[in-house]
Amino acid sequence: MTNGAGTHDFETVSSRTVYSGAILALRLDQVRMPGGRVVEREVIEHHGAVAVAAVDEAGDLVLIDQYRHPIGRRLLELPAGLLDKHGEDPLEAAKRELAEETGLAARDWSVLVDVALSPGFTDEALRIYLATGLTETDRPEPELEEADLEIVRMPVDDAVRAALSGEIVNATAVAGVLALSTARSRNLPLRPADAPWPGMPTAFLDRKAAGK
């Protein structure tokens, strides 16, 4: 016997935007809950993002040490960036970010893992790629925070220990490091680099394209 759990259609009764900025918008939705009650949900629309777990011939993972103003300190992270151009291909964006932040290009690409970063209040999501067969390439002159980032190469096992010890706390880096370690230790197949990404957020870019 079933009570119908898992079958409710969470209808958005109304929606209004209270802020729209450079990289996010704040939307207030009225959503119908099971039983008919309508409640308000705050939703942050955000650009999608890509990140790269780049592994060199020595088996080291390429990380960056970068200042993050909201928390006021530097974090060990994967090279990453926003999908802030309408219609941009995520793989091409990942290649661009790897070059801009590390001066590296990669021969082989695959999808490592997709992550919904905090689905309780935002549609922000990212795709993490695995990149191997690394070579040096032209790196544009870095600006702003990127002008002060440091490139750090670390064996994957050391990166796992750093994540578990709290040295690596960036959510993207933790997800990428642990996914990489698990896939390699269990010899799990990865998706091709052009695999569909149904969870890629588009609401904020659509808003910008519409001039809202």
Image (tube, helix red, strand yellow):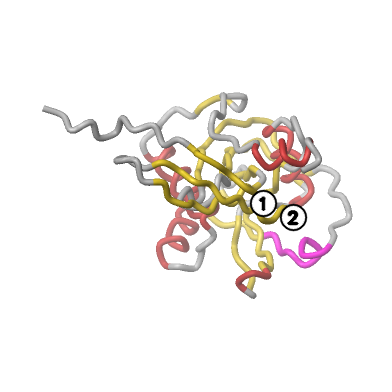
Q: In the visual, does 18 lie left or right of 12?
A: right
Category of crowding for the residue at label 2, using alpha-carbon neighbours closer than 10 angstroms: few (below 14), some (14–19), many (at least 20): few
How far from the left and from the top, in percent, is residue 153?
Answer: 62, 57
Which of the two residues, 134 or 32, is positioned nearer the viewer here?
Answer: 32
Q: Tell me, yes or no, whether the highlighted magenta stretch contains residue 51.
A: no
Disc on res. 25: 1
How far from the left and from the top, in percent, is residue 108?
Answer: 64, 30
Which quadrant of the figure has residue 84? top right
Disc on res. 21: 2
Residues tagged 1 and 2 counted as in contact (Cβ below 8 A): yes
Task: Say which quadrant the C terminus sits in.
Answer: top right
What's the residue type where badge 2 is placed? Gly
Compared to residue 111, the image places residue 37 above or below, namely below
Task: Say which quadrant the N terminus sits in.
Answer: top left
Q: How many marks?
A: 2
Disc on res. 2: none
The range drawn in magenta is 144-151
How far from the left and from the top, in percent, is residue 180?
Answer: 48, 43
How far from the left and from the top, in percent, is residue 158?
Answer: 47, 59
Secondary structure beneath dot 2 equals loop
What's the residue type where badge 1 is placed? Ala
| Magenta-colored segment: predominant secondary structure | helix
